[in-house]
């Protein structure tokens, strides 16, 4: 069940990230899945899959900004 929800949300998350940065879909997906947000999205125990695509993309953006400052 959780895999189905993630499969439904993922294209929208990637579209939001791609459009925001002007990246290719492949780059957006690679960076998302290598991020802490992407790792948490893949983990059933976090429950992140239950949030909206916009919320998850926002978490990714916040993580990227924080990484740039470090």
Image (cartoon, rainbow, N blue to C red):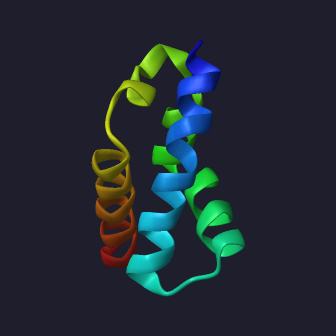
Vertical arrangement, residue 10 with respect to residue 23, above or below: above
- The quarter of the image holding the C terminus is bottom left
- The quarter of the image holding the N terminus is top right
Where does residue 2 sit, x and y in percent of width and height? 56, 17
Foreground residue, 33 or 12?
12
Q: Going by the image, does 59 lie left or right of 40?
A: left
Vertical arrangement, residue 67 with respect to residue 39, above or below: below
Q: Residue at x 62, y 36 (%)?
A: 7
Foreground residue, 13 or 32?
13
Where does residue 61 sit, x and y in percent of width and height? 34, 64
Q: Residue at x 32, y 32 (%)?
A: 51
Q: How many badges with numbers are in the image? A: 0
The quadrant in which residue 65 appears is bottom left
Q: Going by the image, does 65 lie left or right of 49?
A: left
Where does residue 52 sit, x and y in percent of width and height? 32, 39
Vertical arrangement, residue 39 with respect to residue 5, above or below: below
């Amino acid at each position: 069940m959780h895999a189905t929800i993630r499969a439904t949300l993922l294209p929208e998350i990637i579209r939001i990230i791609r459009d925001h940065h002007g990246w290719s879909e492949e780059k957006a997906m690679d960076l998302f899945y290598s991020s802490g947000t992407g790792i948490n999205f893949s983990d059933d125990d976090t429950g992140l899959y239950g949030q909206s695509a916009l919320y998850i993309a926002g978490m990714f953006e916040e993580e990227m900004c924080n990484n740039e400052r470090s």
